Amino acid sequence: MFFLLSKNNLKVDDIVSKAERLLNEEGFKKNAERVQFLAKVNSKRKYRAADLMEIVLNTAKYEGVKDENGGFKIDNEKLLRDWITPDTRMGFIRGNYLDVYGVVVILLLALGGGFVYTLLTIIRYTYIISRSENRNNQKSLKPKKE
């Protein structure tokens, strides 16, 4: 990128020249004005209807697409895309995080099942060992027949 500044060789002239280049770039100016306008609109104002009218007018102005009569043309697909929340653009499953909850439930079931299986295996092993020790003890306690 052509706006990189060197940490070792930092000069004021470099900073000033790169800031001027950035401010003179037309695309950056339009995007900065658009962000400034959206920040004003999204601040908690009272009059949302007036805000919506301003958005429509400014969107047409910043898009810069003109029709045959010289007026600005509005693309309805892009008009209020900044106000549309992501969950409405996603499907039902992703919008409500059901995929994430499903993975969490499956992981918890797998971990719980593994824990229960390991616990039962340990209990079974200790039962078998204690049972065999009891048999050995009982054999040693019985008197030998001669």
Image (cartoon, rainbow, N blue to C red):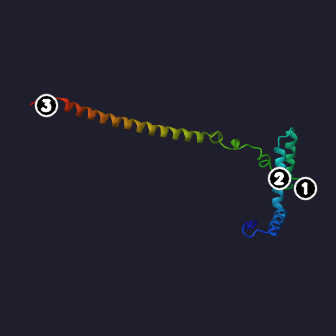
Residue sticking out furthest to the left: 146
Between disc 1 and disc 3, the foreground one is 3
Q: Residues within 10 Å of mark 1 (few under 14, many from 20)?
A: few
Q: Position of residue 64 (x, y in %)?
A: 85, 56
Alpha carbon separation for disc pair 1 and 2: 22 Å
Quarter-of-image position of residue 117 = top left
Residue occupied by mark 1: 70
In percent of the image, x 80 and y 50: which residue is there? Answer: 75
Report the amino acid beneath label 1: Gly
Q: Look at the picture and state if 26 lies above or below 109.
A: below
Report the amino acid beneath label 3: Lys
- For residue 19, side relative to residue 102 (left or right): right
Alpha carbon separation for disc pair 1 and 3: 117 Å
| Disc with the residue nearer the chain's start (3 vs 2) | 2
In percent of the image, x 70 and y 44: which residue is there? Answer: 86
Between disc 3 and disc 2, the foreground one is 3
